Amino acid sequence: MTDPASTLVEVCDLRAEHLDAVVRIDAQHTGEQKADYWAEVFDRFVGSGPRDRRVGLAAEEQGRLIGYLLGEVRAFEFGSEACGWIFAVAVDPESLRAHVASVLLSEACKRFRDAGVDQVRTMVRRNDVGVMSFFRTNGFEGGSFVQLEMNLNEQG
């Protein structure tokens, strides 16, 4: 069955001119304007360097950015093989529930496979039910690693 968004949305590589729209969409979801952060990310993902280990995708509808996904192939310590790692995915609130993020994820997974990896990972806040549901609906499940953290301000 064809995804309804796949006929309406064009997926392409992120370009420098997408920066302002990414900042806007991110701010709509997080409540924070992080222009400096996104400019730094764009320097790494949209620059002229090789993209075989980085994935920066844009979803456009009639030339307007309505979603994005960023990820890369990473190898981690503790015996983890190289894997695809998704660290950002967001859709303009006006285009939510139109399968835009699923179309982006599908293309990202294709590119990760082409880069030679067979696992994709991400991290989601436990209380972010919408994002957790999105990833679970698209085949993600608890993995073999457990994320641990420590608050340095609470240590003596």
Image (cartoon, grey):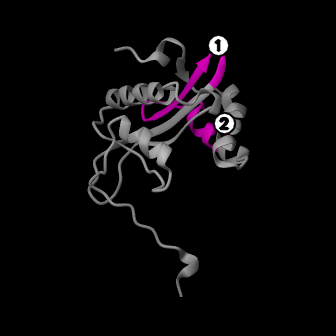
Q: Quadrant of the N terminus?
A: top left
Which amino acid, by three-letter code, is at mark 1? Gln
Q: Residue at x 46, y 51 (%)?
A: 124
In magenta segment, residue 118: no
- In the rendered picture of this protein, how many numbered marks are placed on residues? 2
SS of the residue at dot 1?
Answer: loop
Work out whether residue 100 or residue 36 is closer to the camera in this orientation and state it: 100
Q: Is residue 111 left or right of residue 61?
A: left
Name the spot of residue 22 as percent of width and height, x first.
Answer: 66, 35
Residues in magenta, as a range: 39-65
Residues at badges 2 and 1 in contact (C-beta under 8 Å)? no
SS of the residue at dot 2?
Answer: helix
Any mark on residue 62, and which? 1
Number of residues whose C-alpha sits closer than 10 Å to that of mark 2, classed few (under 14), some (14–19) or many (20 or more)? many
Which amino acid, by three-letter code, is at mark 2? Ile
Q: Is residue 149 above or below residue 58?
A: below
Disc 2: which residue: 25
Name the spot of residue 72 as percent of width and height, x first.
Answer: 44, 39
**In the orientation shown, which residue stands out farthest toward the bottom?**
156
Q: Residue at x 52, y 83 (%)?
A: 155
Precedes in sequence: disc 2 or disc 1: 2
